[in-house]
Image: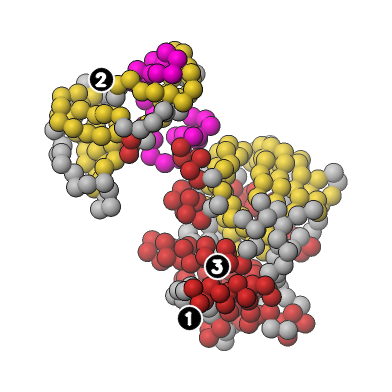
Amino acid sequence: MVHLSRTRLSSVRASSRRVATDRSAVCVGGLVVRYGGNEVLRGVDLRVPAGSILALLGPSGCGKTTLLRSIAGLIEPQEGQIVLGDRTVVGSGVFVAPERRQVGMVFQDWALFPHLSVARNVGFGLTRDARRSGDVTRALELVGLVDCADRLPDTLSGGQQQRVALARALATRPAVLLLDEPFSNLDTTLRTQLRREVTDLLRAVGTTTVFVTHDQEEAFVLGDEVALMLDGKVQQQGAPADLYETPRTLDVADFVGDANLLRGDARGEMARTMVGELPLQASHHGDVAVLVRPEHLRVTVGDDMEVERVEYYGHDAVYVLRDRAAAQVRVRILDRPAFDRGDRVTVQYTGGPAVAYPDA
C-alpha cells in the first residue's frame, strides 16, 4: 500500500495535469430504463458538478449500477437525457457510443486481464501513440505502482489490483470517472485505508467522479455530495450532513443513519412522544413520526424505561431501551456504558428542533 503523503499528492497533482482532461459536469434528467416489463430506473434526476465526487448510495437492487452503466453508455435508456459537460450523449434521438463519451469506469471486480502485465492492463484501452507517449507510466505514477509495471495481477494484493484498475481508467484521460463498488472485495481494514487514499487521489486529479456504494459510511466519507436512490429513483441529493440532519421523506430518514422514528402527537411546533415533548422544525398537527437520532438522547437513573440490550463498539456504545408499552428506542453514548441489561432508566432529549413526518 502506498500512502499519499503531501509530497506524493503534489506529484499527483502535477501528473494529473498531464493525464486528466477537461472537467465535465454530469446532468441526468427523467431517465427511464426498462428490462422487459420491469422499470428499473423510474425518471431519475441527478446532477454532478464538474470536478466533484458524488456518492450514489442505496440498497442492492435499487438501480445504482444501472444508472452508472447508462452514463457510461453500456445501457441505452428508453426515456430521458444524459448530458456530459456541454454534450448530450442520450436524448432526443441521440445515443453516443461508450468509446466516444470520455468516460472511465472501474468495475466492482476490477476486470483485470490475468494474462497481461500491469502495464499492459493499464494501456489496454489506449492507442499505440498514447502508449508510446508515456500515458501508461504517468497513470501508474498517479497510483504509486510504477515498480509493479511488469508484474501480473495475481501477484499483487487486493489493494494494488484495485489501484491498477483505477490507473487504467485514468490513463484514458476521462472527463468523467465512474466507480461501481470498487472496495467491496476488500477486507474491512484495507477497505477503510484504501478509500481514504483513493479519495485524496481523486480530489488531487480533479476528475468529475460518480461512486456507487451501499455503505452509508463510505458514501459520507467519499462524497462531496450524496444522492440516495431507493426503488429506482433519486430520493434526495445534497451534502452528507443535509441527508443526515434533514431527510426529506420518512424513507430517507429510515435509510440514512441510525434513526429513532417515534410516534408523536403534534400541536404546532411541539410534539408529545415517548421521550417527552419535543420541538419541531415545522408546524404539524395530529399524528406524526418524529426523527430522533440516538446521539440526541441522554440516559439517567429513573423508572421510565428498561435497558434491554447494550451494544458496545469501542468508540461508542448504544443502549436499546424499551418502555412499558414495548416501544423501543436507541441511545448512543461516547462513554463506557454505566447501565446494564435490566436497569431502569429515564431518557432525556438533548437535540434541537426535530424533523417530523405526517403519519400516513
Q: Is residue 175 magenta?
A: no
Residue at 73 percent across and 84 percent down: it is 133
- Quarter holding residue 239: top right
Residue 309 position within the rendered picture, expressed as x and y whole percent measured from the top left = 21, 38
Residue 72 visible in rendering: no
Q: Nearer the viewer, mark 2 or mark 1?
A: 2
Disc 3 marks which amino acid?
Answer: Leu
Write down the region rendered in magenta. Answer: 246-273
Q: Is residue 268 magenta?
A: yes
Q: From the viewer's perspective, is residue 10 above or below residue 48?
A: below
Residue to which mark 1 is pinned: 155
Residue 35 position within the rendered picture, expressed as x and y whole percent measured from the top left = 68, 43
**Of the residues under marks 2 and 1, which one precedes in the sequence?**
1
- Kind of element beneath mark 3: helix
Residue 255 position within the rendered picture, expressed as x and y whole percent measured from the top left = 46, 38
Residue at 39 percent across and 15 percent down: it is 265
- Kind of element beneath mark 1: helix
Disc 2 to disc 1, C-alpha distance = 59 Å
Disc 2 marks which amino acid?
Answer: Ala
Quadrant the N terminus occupies: bottom left
Pick the residue in front: 248 or 130: 248
Q: Is residue 148 left or right of residue 337?
A: right
Residue to which mark 3 is pinned: 201
Residue to which mark 2 is pinned: 325
- Label 3 neighbourhood size at 10 Å, few (<14), some (14-19), many (20+)? many
Q: Is residue 229 left or right of residue 208?
A: left
